[in-house]
Amino acid sequence: MAPNRRDFIKQTAAAAAGLSLGLSALGMKIKNGLPYRKLGKTGLDVSLLNVGGSHIGRNNLTDQESVTLIRTAIDEGINFLDNAWEYNDGRSEERMGKALQDGYRDKVFLMTKHHGREPKRAQKHLEDSLRRFKTDVIDVWQFHELDEHHEVDEIYSSGVLDFALRAKEQGKIRFIGFTGHYLPEIHLDMINRGFEWDTVQMPINPLDHHYLSFTQHVLPVAVEKNIGVIGMKSLAGNAVLVNKGAASVEECLRFAMTMPISTLCSGMETVAQLKQNIETTRNFTPLTEGEIADLLNRSLNYAQGGENEGYKGYETNKDDNW
């Protein structure tokens, strides 16, 4: 290994290990057999693992299979659910709404996302989501997929934040956040313009650490401002590290959970996958600095230029040195 590569891995592993020290501020506790952490300034105790909303609405699952998966997750101790207005043309929210009947709604914190950049569209998305979920309130409502700076301009100038605050006053939503996986600087722009965000969702995985890194650039800022961080894409979208034998699913999950996130969103399509991830979560211990260094070393070759993180806009950002 060339000295510069060795030094890079050592430095970034130390930085990642330093970030993990922020776990103590999240007040991790064990409830229902699972680790729980505080969701930032919301004060909510949320399960370290949560159910991703995209996968549960896919065509390869029936409605009943999806309902069974969601209810099994809740029965096993998961109390935070992810979703989005547009997932599978609304089917993900509709299936989750079915799963939350018979008293299950009272056992979870429900999060969904929307593409409202101005009040009228945001209102439609909120009304649609409430109807599909068959609920009166969404616990965490997030502006979804911030990819361009002009979207940040629209959110801060169109009046949609005032609409969100009114919806909160009316009891239709409890907390407000945003998501994105394209450029860390857009997340920082959303935070630095001054709105008091309750949550933020971002990619957290070993590949991200090497290229346009949310882990290195956004996560420390969110922790400092006590914004609840929802991790996603723990397998880096196409699971290249797992498919190439460079890392296991468990290692990728543990890497994300070692960071000071509140909860990790995981897309799961079978009860078997769910139970495997729950077992990893139940047995979770943070990676050591040496284990982080080893994992970052194994992932470095697959992280070059972001080619295996297509959600970051590889063709657009491949020459970006930000």
Image (spheres, rainbow, N blue to C red):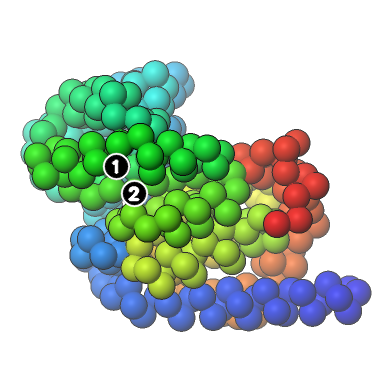
In the rendered image, which quarter contains the C terminus? Answer: bottom right
Q: Report helix, strand or loop for mark 2.
A: strand
Foreground residue among 238 and 322: 322
Q: Is residue 115 above or below residue 155?
A: above
Specify whether 182 is left or right of 286: right
- Which residue sits furthest front? 157
Query: First in sequence: mark 1 or mark 2?
Result: 1
Local crowd at mark 1 within 10 Å, few (<14), some, or many (≥20)?
A: many
Q: Amino acid at mark 1?
A: Leu
Q: Is residue 230 visible?
A: no
Q: Amino acid at mark 2?
A: Gly
Q: Is residue 148 visible?
A: yes
Foreground residue among 308 and 62: 308
- Residue at x-position 42% and y-position 77%: 22
Q: Is residue 1 above or below residue 180?
A: below
Q: Is residue 264 above or below residue 144?
A: below
Q: Position of residue 54 (x, y in %)?
A: 42, 32
Q: Position of residue 150 (x, y in %)?
A: 52, 37
How far is mark 1 from mark 2, CA to CA? 11 Å
Q: Report helix, strand or loop for mark 1.
A: helix
Disc number placed over residue 87 in the picture, else none: none
The residue where tag 1 is placed is 161
- Residue at x-position 28% and y-position 24%: 120
- Residue at x-position 76% and y-position 56%: 321
The residue where tag 2 is placed is 177
Tally the marks.
2
In the rendered image, which quarter contains the N terminus? Answer: bottom right
Q: Position of residue 179 (x, y in %)?
A: 44, 45
Q: Where, by quadrant of the figure, is residue 42 drawn?
A: bottom left
